[in-house]
Image (spheres, rainbow, N blue to C red):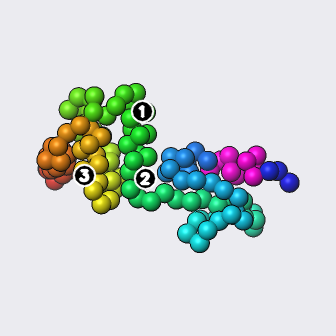
Amino acid sequence: MTSFGDDPFVTAVKPLVDAMGGEMMPPDLAGTDDVVLAWEGEDVVAVRLPQLADSLDHILLALERKQGRPLSELDRKAKQEVVRILEARGAFSVRHGVETVAGALGVSRFTVYNYLNRENAAKSE
């Protein structure tokens, strides 16, 4: 039998788990809140999902890596696009989401709300 890390199923789901900020472990180490994934009737890997607040931090770091620089250094249009992406991913349903995003972008909460209002106004036109 292949070891946990060499399993093709584990290799296949790893990018998704990494993108979510989750942690993978052997299924026998799973806790009650972990998700155990099975393949062909056999438990292969357990996934520990991050807390929502941790997910937001993970998403912000991923966006920063994608931009190649701190989000606070982006121009206004790029910051508005980041807010649009974050809204689509549910970032503002997380407690203190607006404050967290504002801090990452180096803008005020008021500015984030303005970006959100602008996006919502454009959708309703």
Disc 1 and disc 2: Cα gap in Å? 16 Å
Residue 69 picture location, percent across and down: 37, 28
Residue 55 - label: 2
**Start-end of magenta stretch:** 4-13
User: Residue type at mark 2?
Assistant: Ser
Camera-side mark, 1 or 3: 3
Total number of numbered discs in the rendering = 3
- What residue did someone put label 3 on? 98
Disc 3 and disc 2: Cα gap in Å? 14 Å
Mark with earlier residue (3, 2): 2
Mark 1 and mark 2 residues within 8 Å of each other at the beta carbon = no
**Residue plotted at (62% across, 50% down):** 13
- What residue did someone put label 1 on? 66
Residue 82 picture location, percent across and down: 30, 40
Residue 117 picture location, percent across and down: 15, 50
User: Residue type at mark 1?
Assistant: Lys
The quarter holding residue 40 reads bottom right
Q: Is residue 37 visible?
A: no
Q: How many residues crowd mark 3 within 10 Å: few (<14), some (14–19), many (20+)?
A: many
Q: Secondary structure at mark 2?
A: helix
Locate residue 105 relative to residue 42 in the image: left or right.
left
Q: How many residues crowd mark 2 within 10 Å: few (<14), some (14–19), many (20+)?
A: some
Q: Is residue 101 visible?
A: yes
Locate residue 105 relative to residue 39 in the image: left or right.
left
